[in-house]
Structures are given as structure tokens and as C-alpha cells.
Image: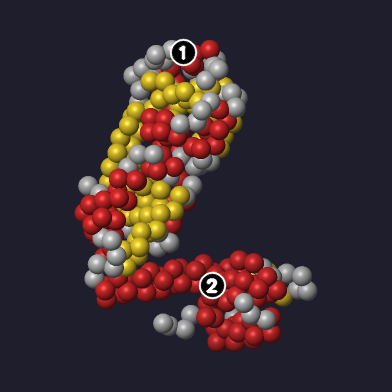
Amino acid sequence: MLDVKPLRYFVTLAETRHFGRAAARLNLSQPPLSRQLAALEASLGVTLIERSPRSVTLTAAGERFYADAKAILASIEQAARQARAAAVGDSGQLTIGFTMCAAYSVLPAYARAYGDAYPDVTLNLREVVSNDLAPQVQSGQIDAAIMFPGAPDKALDTRAIFTEPLCVALSRNHPLARARRLDVARLAREPFVMASEAVAPSLRATIVDHCARGGFAPDVRFEVQLQQTVLSLVDEGVGIALVPKSMSRAQLAGVVFKPLADAPLISQMLVWSPANRNPCLARFLALAN
């Protein structure tokens, strides 16, 4: 392996902003860490950090070098992973990020099919907040993601792999819980629990647009990051939610799921970087069509 130790030391220090904590994370004592950082600054001819008794502050040069060093380390990690996969053929590692909705829809079948086809590949599955998935694909932290549509990124490729209607999630004790199907207009006076726009913009927009067609803007009482949290709050009876139908598989005892009249559709996308040369990814893309 290439000697990336100085970069790794600097990135750890930049993230902890403290020599003691950085040394502990790296399983070092502070003196060799300090010497490595001083040598790195000398080799670059710039000051990267400003030291104080209690903390570390990055200079402007340090902030720039931190961003680049993180990208370099991610690229090296990906290069090493790809080299190992290429050397052994059908073995290697593949990391797929996903949202909770994917866990209740397409992900289990994909994982089973891929595992059956490539038993010597280590398949790492990471549940990630929706708005963090595309950046992690771009940086190489994960090889591909299953996520809701987001803002277009020309550097990434996408493919729609699953489409489903929204449904209404209600507390079992809610007066509307006995309805067979609900028109969105009947929800106009209800408090909503909803994923924030920053976390899932396409899902949020679909819900808001459908409510607008029903003649109202949703009264959003709680904004959260995870669909599991949405259902937990619905379970407590503090609000209702429009969620992808696959979330009904969560089977919370206190939550019922009702069909929504003229329900809008929400898609899940497979997202990957065409610059990613992991051969395991190519096989996964061929399978997930």
C-alpha cells in the first residue's frame, strides 16, 4: 500500500480538532503525531494548523488541504478495493447505501439475488439518511445507492428501479382508521408528520403537491429525517403521514395504512458514479435492471 499515513493523521486531527483525541483515535501518543504533522507542514511549505493549549484550528490552507486529503484517501481506498476485486475475479466488496423505504421494497430481493449469484463478494449494506446518499456515492464511500429522486447531478448515473403509490399512515385509534380508502381532502385539518425538504425533497414535493390538489397546504407539525421516525410519531397519535406503500410492511402495532384515492407515485432510483470501476458494481447494475 502507498504510505498515506501523514494524510490520515492530518485528516483525523482536522476532524477532532484536538491532538489528544486524534492520537487516541489513531492509537498513538501525542509526540509522534505532532512530529508527523510538523513534517507534513514542512514538506508542503505552508502552515496547516494553529495550535492552542486546548484545541486546534485549521488555517485557510489547512481547510483546503483537509478537503483534498479526504478525497485522496477515499480514492486510494476505492483503488485498493478495486485492485483486490480485479485480482480475484468474482470476489471483492460492494457497498450499497439505501433508505428505509428500500429496506421494505427492493433491497431484500436484490441482496438475495446478488448474494446467490456472487457468494464470494462481501455485500455491505448501509442505511443512510436520504440526502447523504448521493454525496457518498460521489466520494466513493459507497458504490451505489437506492434512494428517492433528488436534484440532478451530472456526475452520477441514475435508473428508476421501483415505483409505488403513497398511502395514508394513521394511528389505529384515529377516527379515519376505519375508512377503506381516503381522499386527500379529508386530511385537510389533520396535523402532518413529514420528512424535511432537505432530507427527501422529491417525496416532500409529491406530498405537498397532492395536498394542493385537495385544496389545502398540509399542516406540518413535525419534520424528521427518517421514515421510521415518521411512523413512530404516527403511532403516538400526534399526526398522520403520507408514506410510500412499502412502509406498510413495517407492521407497527399502533399504525394502520389506508389506500389514498388518486394516489401519486413515488420512485426509487439506483444511483452510481460512472467513474467507479469496481467490477462488483458492474455486476450489480446488470442484476438490478
Element marked by disc 1: helix
Going 32% across and 58% down the picture, which residue do you hit?
273
Decide if residue 137 is on the left or right side of residue 24: left
> Residue 216, position in %: x, y?
49, 17
Q: Quadrant of residue 105?
A: top left
Q: Quadrant of residue 74?
A: bottom left
Residue type highlighted by circle 1: Arg
Which of pointers 2 and 1 lies earlier in the amino acid sequence?
Answer: 2
Tell me the residue that label 1 is attached to: 178
Going 52% across and 77% down the picture, which residue do you hit?
7
> Residue 192, position in %: x, y?
54, 25
Residue type highlighted by circle 2: Phe
Element marked by disc 2: helix
Decide if residue 13 is on the left or right side of residue 216: right
Going 69% across and 85% down the picture, which residue do you hit?
31
Tell me the residue that label 2 is attached to: 65
> Residue 163, position in %: x, y?
30, 35
Q: In this view, does 36 lie above or below 83?
A: below
* Discs 2/1, front: 1
Q: In this view, does 100 lie above or below 37?
A: above
Q: Which of 133 and 49 is in front in this view?
A: 133
Q: In which quarter of the image is residue 90?
A: bottom left
- Label 2 vs label 1: CA separation? 59 Å
Mark number, residue 71: none
Can the viewer see residue 146?
A: yes
